[in-house]
Amino acid sequence: EALRGEGALLVNAAGQRFMTALHPDAELAPRDIVARGVYTEWRAGRVPALDCRAALGARILTQFPAVAAACVRAGIDPVRQPIPVAAAAHYHMGGIETDLDGRSSLTGLWACGEAASTGLHGANRLASNGLLEALVFARRAALSIGAGPATAPPLILPDLPPAPLPDPALVARLREAMTAGAGVLRDAAGLQAALRVVAEVEAGQPDCPQLQNMTATATLICAAALLRRESRGAHARTDYPDTVAPRRSRMTLSQALALRPAPEPEPL
């Protein structure tokens, strides 16, 4: 994003700029529109890339050393070559429902930042709102906690017994399923397919709490997206492209699990 702000252009393998046809601001369009443009080019096999040659040239080496170093590790010369790019997960818009002081419905639990659902972002990730989430809402939560009665019982979480780490193969399968079914572009069939895989991944290592946390989050994301039959901000349904009346959606894990099919049995 910083490179695009400096004038770098998004191009495909033919050297054509594809954002100019998608938004008047082209490469400086809102993040969800840029992500969909990059994803569409990638899915079509047109190899989207960020061309910094005219805008930055050799300045990329000193002004953006981390990007330049990553390019070198990948065998790319960013001074002379476009940099291949892909749309990626950036920010979780949602989380634990709280009031304006970060208080949840569970006594003794406050949440702020990316873990909380305050409605601050709406349906899109807005630039610099993370600062507002982290500083303003963190302070409000801290003041709310401090203003509570000193004798209030603390929320005590149970100690979990030792457990195995998640199977890397199952984590990779979960990531692939979420990218394919609940990624930049969504539809009912893809979300339902993702929910089936999530159930199978969870059943593949039922004694791993860390993996269960991952599958719980994935289940909530897919179920909420499946029920929201519209497109709004970063939530883009190809089978429901229109935007309808605004509403906030709330869901418990048990409600989400009710939409998830049982895992298919392993073949004998």
Image (cartoon, rainbow, N blue to C red):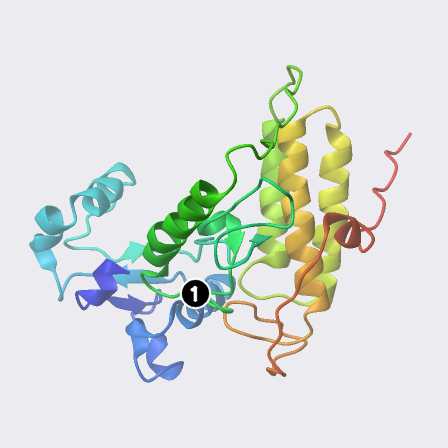
Query: Which residue sits at x=58%, y=39%?
Result: 108
Residue 251 in sight: yes
Instruction: Looking at the picture, tell me which residue is in the foreground, 249 or 244.
Output: 249
In the rendered view, does 189 fall on the left or right side of 55? right
Looking at the image, residue 164 lies above or below residue 7: above
Can you give x and y, in whole percent of width and height, for residue 56 in the image? 12, 60
Can you give x and y, in whole percent of width and height, for residue 206 in the image? 75, 28
Residue on which the image places disc 1: 35
In the rendered view, does 120 fall on the left or right side of 11? right
Image quarter of the C terminus? top right
Can you give x and y, in whole percent of width and height, for residue 76 in the image? 24, 46
In the rendered view, does 142 fall on the left or right side of 235? left
Residue 17 in sight: no
Can you give x and y, in whole percent of width and height, for residue 264 in the image? 86, 42
Query: Which residue sits at x=44%, y=58%?
Result: 87
Looking at the image, residue 161 lies above or below residue 185: above
Query: Which residue sits at x=61%, y=55%?
Result: 180
Instruction: Looking at the picture, tell me which residue is in the foreground, 61 or 240.
Output: 240
At label 1, counting other C-alpha atoms closer than 10 Å, the crowd grade (few under 14, some 14-19, many 20 or more) is some
Q: Which quadrant of the figure has residue 244?
A: bottom right
The furthest residue to the right: 268
Question: Total of numbered circles in the picture?
Answer: 1
Q: Amino acid at mark 1?
A: Ala
Query: Which residue sits at x=54%, y=50%?
Result: 103
Image quarter of the N terminus? bottom left
In the rendered view, does 56 fall on the left or right side of 245? left
Q: Secondary structure at mark 1?
A: helix
